[in-house]
Amino acid sequence: AKDRNATLEAVVAAADTLEEDGMHLTPQDCTVLIAALGRRRLSDRALAVLDLMEQRGMPPNLFHFNAAISACEAVADWEKAIALLDKMRQCWLHTPDQISF
């Protein structure tokens, strides 16, 4: 389905629209958004939200990573899930917890 083909540009455009309307994404908003996209099996869009956060100077935390890993789990994309675990350890120095696994 076309809706499942996520691009970072589409997520950025949606966030820009929200901000133009005076609504700024908070870290909590991003957690909810990533989790909601994951429940809808839109893991690529969930991962694009992580990219957007980095682009906007909002470093993802353990909650964001766990929600993104769950999104990957929903579509059985274990390779991306493992890559997220590695990224957590290497780049952000977050230690995966029980929910991460």
Image: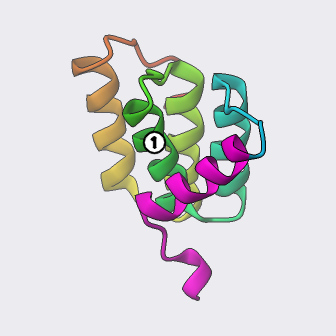
The magenta segment: 1-20
The amino acid sitting under disc 1 is Leu
Say if 31 sits above or below 21 in the image: above
Say if 75 sits above or below 33 in the image: below
For label 1, the SS is helix
Q: Can residue 4 be seen in this view?
A: yes
On the image, the x and y values in percent for residue 93 come to 31, 11
Residue 18 is covered by the magenta coloring: yes
Residue 48 is covered by the magenta coloring: no
What residue sits right under mark 1 in the picture?
Answer: 52
Residue plotted at (57% across, 51% down): 71
On the image, the x and y values in percent for residue 8 come to 42, 57
Say if 90 sits above or below 67 in the image: above
Residue plotted at (35% across, 31% down): 85
Residue plotted at (25% across, 20% down): 91
Residue plotted at (59% across, 64% down): 42
Q: Residue furthest bottom?
A: 1
Q: Is residue 98 visible?
A: no
Total count of labels: 1
Within-10-Å neighbours for mark 1: few <14, some 14–19, many 20+: many
